[in-house]
């Protein structure tokens, strides 16, 4: 496994960890993450056991993710762009009111500087 593949799997594992319930099961995995995992699985040359171990999931969970990814591919939802990590900066102590970008009903991102918002929008476009 190359170092780039290893780093990519670490990012996927971290993204999957955000989809864990308090009991540890995977819930509400975003479509783009599912598609990215399927793409990694398709390129994987090692054993499937090594892949799901590197992702920190069980073989049954990987099978469900792959099946859902294939369904998304049939529905042409696999045209989503790649995930681009954004550097999160700490909020300033000057008490400014943040700009809030609502992603959905439960998630939002606060930006305290216009430059950070613009950088985020450029990377996510």
Image (cartoon, rainbow, N blue to C red):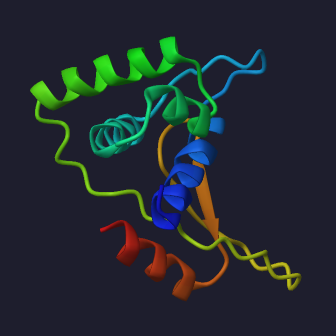
Q: Position of residue 123 (x, y in %)?
A: 39, 73
User: Residue most toward the right?
Assistant: 93
Quadrant housing residue 75: top left
Residue in view at x 76 percent, y 79 percent: 96
Quadrant housing residue 50: top right
Residue in view at x 27 percent, y 38 percent: 42
User: Residue most toward the top?
Assistant: 60
Q: Is residue 42 above or below residue 48?
A: below
Q: Position of residue 102 (x, y in %)?
A: 51, 51
Residue in view at x 49 percent, y 11 percent: 60
Q: Position of residue 95 (x, y in %)?
A: 84, 78
Quadrant housing residue 86: bottom right
Q: Nearer the viewer, residue 118 or 68?
A: 68
Of the 4 image quadrants, the one containing the C terminus is bottom left
Labels in figure, total: 0
Q: Nearer the viewer, residue 123 or 51?
A: 51
Q: Position of residue 56 (x, y in %)?
A: 64, 32
Q: Is residue 119 above or below residue 102?
A: below
Asked whether residue 101 appears in the rendered view, the answer is no
Q: Is residue 88 above or below residue 113?
A: above
Residue 53 placement, left or right of 24: left
Residue in view at x 61 percent, y 73 percent: 87
Asked whether residue 36 appears in the rendered view, the answer is yes
Q: Is residue 107 above or below residue 121?
A: above
């Amino acid at each position: 496994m190359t170092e780039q593949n290893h780093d990519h799997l670490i990012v996927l594992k971290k993204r999957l960890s955000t989809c864990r319930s308090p009991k540890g099961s995977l819930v509400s995995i975003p479509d783009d993450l599912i598609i990215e995992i399927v793409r990694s699985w398709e390129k994987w040359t090692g054993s499937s056991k090594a892949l799901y171990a590197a992702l920190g999931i069980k073989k049954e969970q990987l099978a469900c993710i792959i099946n859902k990814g294939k369904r998304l591919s049939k529905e042409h939802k696999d045209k989503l762009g790649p995930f681009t990590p954004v550097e999160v900066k700490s909020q300033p102590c000057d008490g400014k009111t943040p700009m809030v970008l609502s992603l959905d009903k439960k998630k939002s991102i606060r930006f305290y500087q216009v430059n950070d918002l613009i950088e985020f929008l450029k990377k996510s476009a």
